[in-house]
Amino acid sequence: MVSVSPYSSVRRKGRLLFSVCLLMLCAAGCTRQDGRDVATQFSETRPQEFFQTSVDRMATLAMHDNLESLYLLMNKLYLRNPAEWRKSGFVDARSAERNVRNAIEQQTPLAQMGNRRDLAALSYALSPEFLGDRVGAFIYAIGSMLVTAHGGRLEFFMTDQINPKFVSNAARNIEKATWLLSQRQNANGELMLFSNEISEEGSNLSFATEFGKIVARLDLLTQMLDERYRRIGLNYAQSLLFLNFLPVQ
């Protein structure tokens, strides 16, 4: 029979107690950290978000991200086509960018486009007849088209409705515009705007990548909107099927 030293037994119990205490401290630390994270996120919530569904919030964030992608593309296009911002009459590219950005977000006409917006502006910006700042006109046209497709709003709430068909159409229009951007030439056979580049020195597809992000967000939003309206119809059908009375308040 093997005898167990009382000292060894005490040591094992001590190690066990230490392990349990350590686990409890870690769990408490994680709980406090999670609590702080939740509290921080809640404190950053704006009051108007209480009037948004999850789809409304997603649409708002997608619109913000899509416009930011457009502004990034505008900056890249001005860098590759510096002669364009000079046609706008501004002292530098940053001022030209700010002017386009304000026109999109405030939904005001861009001076060089007359009263053209969204699709009319897009066709004009890529036409040989247009002799102004083609970068600013192109970005403004797409930005105004996005806003129009979302019902003329940049932020969305429970009372707002977004037509998923128009959002999907906007995605397809951007795909076409991206292709035209890389193909449309002037009378001299030169590209109207330099964007993507594939040459022996290497390739630069950052423009196509950023446009692809916009299209992906629009397609995802379209699916979310379709599902929301499908569920509304399904819930109504279920209420009729099970003869449930509809709430009145």
Image: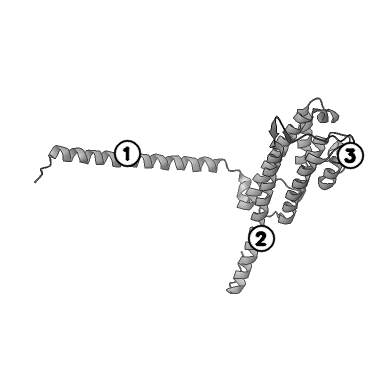
- Residue 15, given in percent of the width and then of the height, sits at 24, 38
Q: CA distance from mark 1 to mark 2?
A: 50 Å
Q: Is residue 58 left or right of residue 144?
A: left
Label 1 amino acid?
Answer: Leu
- Residue 132, given in percent of the width and then of the height, sits at 87, 34
> Vertical placement of 132 versus 176: above or below?
above
Q: Which mark is residue 13?
A: none
Q: Is residue 146 visible?
A: no
Task: Return the residue at label 1.
Answer: 22
Q: Is residue 93 left or right of residue 225?
A: right
Task: Return the residue at label 3.
Answer: 128
Task: Return the residue at label 2.
Answer: 229
Color encoding of the figure:
one colour
Q: CA distance from mark 3 to mark 1?
A: 73 Å
Q: Residue 235's image quarter? A: bottom right
Quarter of the image with the C terminus is: bottom right
> Vertical placement of 182 versus 89: above or below?
below
The mark that comes first in sequence, 1 or 2, is: 1
Q: Name the outermost residue toward the left.
A: 1
Label 3 amino acid?
Answer: Pro
> Vertical placement of 38 versus 226: above or below?
above
| Residue found 25% across the figure and 41% down from its top | 16
- Residue 233, given in percent of the width and then of the height, sits at 65, 65
Q: Secondary structure at mark 1?
A: helix
